[in-house]
Image (cartoon, helix red, strand yellow):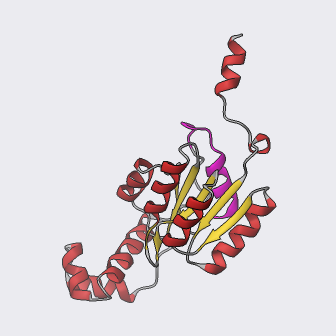
Amino acid sequence: MQGDVLMADAPLAFEERADKSLLIVDDDRPFSSRLARAMEARGYQVRVAESVAEGLSAIESEAPAFAVIDMRLGDGNGLDVIERLKNRRPEARGVILTGYGNIATAVTAVKMGAFDYLAKPADADEIHAALMAIPGERATPPENPMSADRVRWEHIQRVYELCGRNVSETARRLNMHRRTLQRILAKRAPR
């Protein structure tokens, strides 16, 4: 009898799930096309949206069981899409993808209902594993994680872009000397 209770609480394996619908919301068309094909090959029924508005519309028409959502989209923030998904279908599993990963954003994404948070470029195997993970289970560390220097460089590049490529404003916001920032921007990205 006790074994029956444990089995009832255990999440269903992907193959046992009736609904394998997946919504991909990403404005990088080549990436979303490759990901859609790879996820279809894994058994998902995939729909693709390229904006927050399209993602919200797709959720309103038919909320999927799974979602892969880019954090930064041309018309807004992917967190709005994950929030709507969780409101419409609380048991849905959504993964947020971003090229600009940081701890604060990851915490916000999880608080808003994301099941996991992955840095781009994430491959289909990583995304599938994140969608299928058992709650509370620790993820396996990535094979080739970004170095601390690369994470720092990515953050500086992000702030630089958000400041309209204005070196002085970027240096002020990063509390960094302008010449130091110019030297960093002139270098290639670290590995």
Q: Tell me where residue 119 appears, x and y as whole percent.
A: 52, 63
Observer-nearest of 72 and 145: 72
Quarter of the figure with residue 133: top right
Does residue 144 appear in the picture of this structure?
Answer: no
- What is the span of residues highlighted in magenta in the rendered image? 122-138
Identified at 75% across, 42% down, the residue is 17
Observer-nearest of 41 and 102: 41
Does residue 135 appear in the picture of this structure?
Answer: yes
Left or right, 66 with reference to 98: right
Number of marks: 0
Vertical arrangement, residue 100 with respect to residue 45, above or below:
below
Vertical arrangement, residue 62 with respect to residue 174, above or below:
above
Identified at 57% across, 38% down, the residue is 135
Q: Which residue in the rendered view is the most extreme toward the front?
A: 61
Identified at 71% across, 63% down, the residue is 46
Residue 72 in the magenta stretch? The answer is no
- Which of the image's four quarters has the N terminus? top right
Q: Tell me where residue 93 appears, x and y as whole percent.
A: 58, 49
Q: Tell me where residue 187 appears, x and y as whole percent.
A: 41, 86
Quarter of the figure with residue 3: top right
Q: Tell me where residue 71 appears, x and y as whole percent.
A: 47, 66
Vertical arrangement, residue 88 with respect to residue 156, above or below:
above
Left or right, 108 with reference to 142: left
Residue 126 in the magenta stretch? The answer is yes
Q: Which residue in the rendered view is the most extreme toward the top?
A: 1
